[in-house]
């Protein structure tokens, strides 16, 4: 959005408790709306976090103060009480948008951006989207492609890119899962030919990461990032002809779909993501790895742009009402 009240730049705070997936969602939406974005991390421990968790009381850290932003975008249930407190402290001037279902204080937000499988009904204050918000833009992909093409070209085409996550609460990513993934990737590569580029995340257990490195150590057309040097994640998103993503990460799956490449899902059977994964399959946005159809190019989903347009409209209405 170009300019706010009195011609000044719009300001936004992207508020989370620090998890990478939540940060990318909050920051991606905030940056799509406002010219000036500041990331804030809600307390995760101590009295403020305890009050927020048990009573929903968002006591703001003393360093958080005016000038209050035009917009606060929070993501994650534990960040919601602090976003509510920011709106109250601003006298209601700050527009409060929450990503995901906050489950409490829903009426405190001017807009809630929730995914299709969330149990919320779309309406004036609830927007439903197919995939998670993200900060993957065409400009970012183009820059990553230019940076990584010289390093990836030797792997060959078609290039199968693989994004690997890690444990979730109550469901570890074990060596048996790693063995299944390696076997599935070998089968898929036998069918496709070409190269293989695998990026574990920093959440990937060491035992799984090492299993991937060992399995493809003698394969000249395979690359496995060992967490040393630059992270190839954006380069793989930009350059792969098709993508495989583990289902522990809603953010990684959503970012893969945003590229418009065929996306195949390695299902780790995380109960909390079952509805999300099934909705993607039902809509034809992704297939499960090993599906005989092999997947097809997805319709690149850009929920961030859709949500940003909705937020801009709310800001414009607020400006109009305030004169």
Image (cartoon, helix red, strand yellow):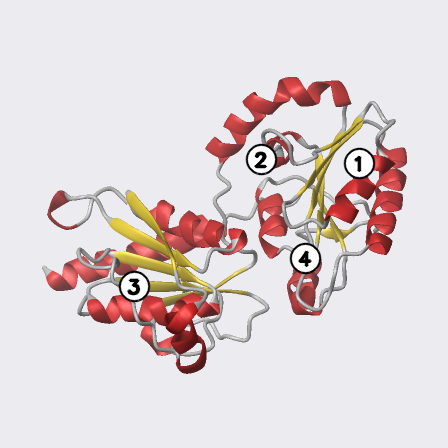
Dot placed on the residue nearer the N-terminal end, 3 or 1: 3
Residue highlighted by disc 3: 61
Q: 310 or 171, which is in the foreground?
A: 171
Q: Which circle, 3 or 1, is nearer the viewer?
A: 3
Q: 110 or 105, which is in the foreground?
A: 105
Crowding around mark 1 (Cα neighbors within 10 Å: few <14, some 14 to 19, many 20+) is: some
Dot placed on the residue nearer the N-terminal end, 4 or 1: 1
Crowding around mark 3 (Cα neighbors within 10 Å: few <14, some 14 to 19, many 20+) is: few
Dot placed on the residue nearer the N-terminal end, 4 or 3: 3
Dot placed on the residue nearer the N-terminal end, 4 or 2: 2
Q: Which circle, 4 or 1, is nearer the viewer?
A: 1
Q: 203 or 281, which is in the foreground?
A: 203
As drawn, the residue found furthest toward the front would be 46
Residue highlighted by disc 4: 248
User: Image quadrant of residue 8?
Assistant: top left
Q: Secondary structure at mark 1?
A: helix
Residue highlighted by disc 2: 234
Q: Residue at image x 55%, y 71%?
A: 118
Residue highlighted by disc 1: 213
């Amino acid at each position: 959005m170009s300019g706010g009240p009195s011609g000044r730049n719009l300001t936004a705070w992207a508020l989370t408790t620090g998890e990478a997936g939540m940060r990318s969602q909050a920051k991606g939406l905030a940056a799509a709306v406002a010219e000036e974005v500041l990331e804030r991390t809600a307390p995760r421990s101590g009295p403020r976090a305890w009050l927020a968790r048990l009573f929903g009381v968002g006591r703001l850290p003393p360093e958080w103060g005016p000038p209050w932003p035009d917009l606060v975008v929070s993501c994650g249930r534990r960040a919601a009480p602090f976003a509510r407190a920011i709106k109250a402290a601003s006298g209601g001037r700050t527009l409060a948008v929450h990503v995901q279902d906050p489950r409490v204080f829903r009426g405190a937000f001017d807009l809630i951006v929730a995914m299709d499988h969330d149990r919320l009904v779309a309406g004036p204050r609830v927007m439903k989207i197919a995939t998670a918000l993200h900060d993957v833009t065409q400009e970012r992909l183009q820059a990553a492609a230019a940076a990584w093409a010289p390093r990836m070209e030797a792997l060959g085409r078609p290039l199968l890119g693989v994004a690997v996550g890690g444990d979730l609460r109550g469901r570890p990513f074990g060596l048996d899962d790693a063995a299944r993934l390696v076997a599935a990737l070998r089968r898929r590569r036998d069918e496709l030919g070409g190269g293989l580029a695998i990026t574990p995340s920093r959440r990937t257990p060491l035992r799984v990461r090492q299993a991937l490195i060992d399995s493809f150590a003698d394969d000249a057309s395979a690359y496995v990032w060992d967490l040393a040097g630059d992270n190839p994640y954006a380069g793989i998103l930009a350059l792969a002809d098709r993508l495989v993503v583990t289902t522990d990460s809603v953010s990684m799956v959503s970012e893969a779909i945003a590229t418009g490449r065929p996306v195949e899902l390695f299902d780790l059977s995380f109960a909390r993501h079952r509805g999300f994964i099934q909705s993607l399959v039902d809509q034809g946005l992704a297939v499960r790895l090993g599906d005989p159809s092999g997947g097809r190019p997805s319709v690149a989903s850009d929920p961030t742009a859709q949500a940003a347009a909705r937020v801009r409209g709310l800001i414009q209405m607020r400006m109009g009402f305030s004169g």
